[in-house]
Amino acid sequence: MPSTSPWDGPDLDPVRDLARSFFAKEVEPNVGKYIDAHHVDRDLWNKAGDVGLLCMSIPEEYEGGGGTFAHEAVLIEEQARIGDTSWGVSLHNGIIAPYITVYGTEEQKRKWLPAMASGEMVGAIAMTEPGTGSDLQAVATRAVREGDEYVINGSKTFITNGGQADLIIVVAKTDPAQGAKGISLIVVEADREGFRRGRLLDKVGQRGQDTSELFFDNVRVPVSNLLGESEGMGFIQLMQQLPQERLIIAVAAVAGMEVALERTISYTKEREAFGRPVFGFQNTKFSLAEAATTARIARVFVDDCISKHLRGELDIPTVAMAKWWTTEQSMDVLDTCMQLHGGYGYMNEYVVGRMWADARVQKVYGGTNEIMKDIISRTL
Ligand SMILES: Cc1cc2nc3c(=O)[nH]c(=O)nc-3n(C[C@H](O)[C@H](O)[C@H](O)COP(=O)(O)OP(=O)(O)OC[C@H]3O[C@@H](n4cnc5c(N)ncnc54)[C@H](O)[C@@H]3O)c2cc1C
């Protein structure tokens, strides 16, 4: 079906074609392997860099693609089309690279962005700690300045791309007495002494993703690794960038609903029970009609958010609405799709069951849905 999204147009066709063929050739045949290994092949990043799928929305002067968030949205949709969540490319492209682009000094941008665009460096962001997730101001990781260096101590958990990351944006306290104003973002390269990765975490879904623990034990980085010009800006930087992270989650949620529906419509038209296609039962038609309506409403809302974001007009409460609502609806739609697959829906060989398990965390990460409602309620 042609796209009805107002932000989508013929100028995005080449990137959609490229992404679709890349996922079909390089990712889809390997998803089972990634799930077993709990990570993608490291050279997938380099292959994606070679064809221009990394850092598409980063300026060309830093060897990015010079595109916009629309390019990243297309990539997210095409990844959803094959039901993959193993490859943390939307985080690398849509979250880590923008932090460096927006807040980095010229030197930082020149040093890290070309390496991220080629796949030489994989990015991650480490906010969450064993003791704190939602309450970001309570992070215990410390960065103490000693001369021209910061000495970082602390531990992080649930870090997407944590197993393969070469460049980690660490949320640390540079001045614990200052609360939110004492938080800074400091970039740590993974080859620094004292940095250690923990386990690849054993998750309910997204099992091909190398989500992991990270430990920082007297890790020394030059003060020039501070993101931005001055200490204490971390919390504000996070608040400014989290909307794009939440929009990415909403885009993935909508695309997931659409893909699951497409697959379920085909399945129910083929599968027979009591001598007729499962699609022939009124319950199936009504369930799919309801799910299709939900997916359509979600699409219209998220399309509006994307258009606003491209114009620089997307506000924090609106994207919080999109994040919580689409991720809740996605669970309902995926549950319906799974039910209509009968027992096969619960088998990993059918993508719909895996999508259901993978989607559940969307209600949790990027700020839980309860936190989203808290953000919205403050504006009421
Ligand atoms: C697969 C996966 C990938 C992730 N990737 C990353 C990553 O790359 N980087 C990163 O830094 N983090 C990442 N996270 C962490 C994620 O962002 C946190 O899990 C999330 O923010 C919630 O924090 P928490 O787990 O500590 O839960 P808690 O904060 O302990 O929350 C527990 C419950 O209490 C509720 N709650 C908390 N505060 C309030 C409140 N004020 N009002 C109402 N209810 C409240 C929550 O909504 C939740 O239901 C990831 C998590 C997962 C599972």
Image (cartoon, rainbow, N blue to C red):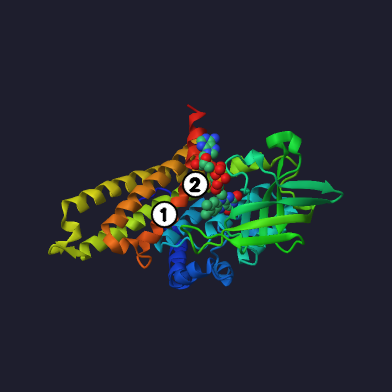
- The single residue placed furthest to the top in the displayed view is 380
Q: Quadrant of residue 213?
A: bottom right
**Residue 189 appears at what percent x and percent y?**
71, 60
Vertically, is 16 above or below 314? below
SS at mark 2 in the image: loop
Q: Can the viewer see residue 13?
A: no
Q: Is residue 271 left or right of residue 58?
A: left
Q: Nearer the viewer, residue 120 or 141?
A: 141
Report which residue position mark 1 lands on: 9
Report which residue position mark 2 lands on: 364
The residue sitting at 85% across, 51% down in the picture is 148
SS at mark 1 in the image: loop
Disc 2 marks which amino acid? Val
Q: Is residue 34 left or right of residue 226?
A: left
Is the residue indicated by label 2 positioned so its CB lies within 8 Å of ligand 1? yes
**Residue 173 appears at what percent x and percent y?**
72, 43
The residue sitting at 87% across, 49% down in the picture is 147
**Residue 115 appears at what percent x and percent y?**
66, 64
